[in-house]
Amino acid sequence: MSQFVFKMPDLGEGTVEAEIVAWHTKPGESVAEDQVIVEVMTDKAAVEVPAPVSGRVVSITGEPGDKIAVGSPLIVFDTAAMPAVDLEGAAAVVAQVAAVAAPVAPARAKVVGAAAAPAPRSGRVMTSPANRRRAREAGVDLATIAGSGPGGRILRSDLMAVGNQPTPSDVSAETPAVRATAPETTEIKVIGLRRLIAQRMTESKRTIPHFAYVEEVDVTELESLRLHLNGSLPQEAPSLTYLPFVVLALTRALDSFPQCNACYDAAREVLVRHRAVHVGVATQTPDGLKVPVVRNAQDLSVWDLAAEIRRVSERARANTATRDELVGSTITVTSLGKLGGIASTPVINAPEVAIIGLNKAAERPVVHGGTIVVRRIMNLSSSFDHRFVDGYDAAAMIQMLKGLLEHPATIFIPKVKTS
């Protein structure tokens, strides 16, 4: 027996270990060189690791949820029955594993129709880690799906199209007899991104004394401006939401409250204030909450902000965002859109010291100019790290943001310089 021991590769950025999310092979199976063998996660980046050689799998190390140190044995191959192993080529594969996480350029999805399933194909199936997990959970063989993405890459829409096709087993699956024997509980192991989210939320609430502040904002004039600008867009262009206006107004307010555009380095016990405003945009994805970053928001127009918010959010949802697009924010904005409710208490995205939440905008009767009128009202829910942002400053910053949003023309007027 000729064995090749493949060790957990160095995934860069000072990574010392990686968590196993899912194995795509098992002992006894034969794999081809460059075939995806395991999906691992470090920080917020999911990486598909390909086999550096062809061979039969002798053993694997770890189960989903286990963390394996860089340099520790990950999988052992028996290469005796295969062609001679190109050790230089294998080393090159190991050196380039981090590049496997590089995203494929987003493409417009083409929904696959209800045509007969194609014959299983051989070789590596190109798709995202999230789609591999969905396929496993749905019992779908990815090799039988024709991908509509670049190079035959399987997109989420391809998988959904297959999953929407009823089968005879689907029709009979919901009989009373089957429902009666269904388990009372379902255990779901918390691993991967979901565990990372849980750890960070726990750490944030445990270490940061949150100070919450909610303010009511009259966005009637902002809504009028938004509708006016949207009316001038080409028919196929995406419309403006409140979010780019809020982000733009926030960059103006932070000029006067730099203590809110900061991160706390707990290891050095140093508060780092930033001149540039790198806005994290909390984004719900099929894999959980991610926070892609809009960099240098203070230098962008409302149109540029809208486009960049849309771009990074779509990449996060499609699981094609790079690690650099998911780290480095200095303040975060979160919006629940139509589900925004009246108020919320957003959790600070550590190591930042502030987060601003947009709640639902709705028409309400209010007193305006001495009379009761109907105005469009939206609440801003914010949280601050009370160790570094005093309550007065937090309230004053939100009041300034409120003033900018209620008189949206002032968002675009340069600040008056005083001598």
Image (cartoon, grey):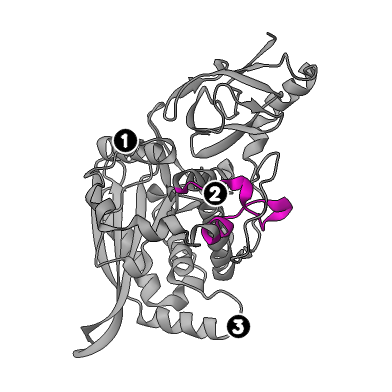
Quarter where residue 387 is shown: top left
Q: Which mark is residue 319?
A: 2
Are the residues flagged by discs 2 and 1 in contact, CB closer than 8 Å? no
On the image, numbered disc 1 is attached to which residue? 203
Numbered disc in front, either 2 or 1: 2
Q: Which residues are magenta?
A: 138-161
Q: Which mark is residue 305?
A: none
Quarter where residue 223 is shown: bottom left
User: Which secondary structure, mark 3?
Assistant: loop
Q: Is-magenta flag for residue 158? A: yes
Q: Residue at x 55, y 53 (%)?
A: 318
How busy is the neighbourhood of tag 2: few (under 14 within 10 Å), some, or many (20 plus)? many
Under mark 2, the amino acid is Asn
Q: Which mark is residue 235?
A: 3
Q: Is-magenta flag for residue 325? A: no
Quarter where residue 29 is shown: top right
C-alpha distance separating marks 2 and 1? 24 Å
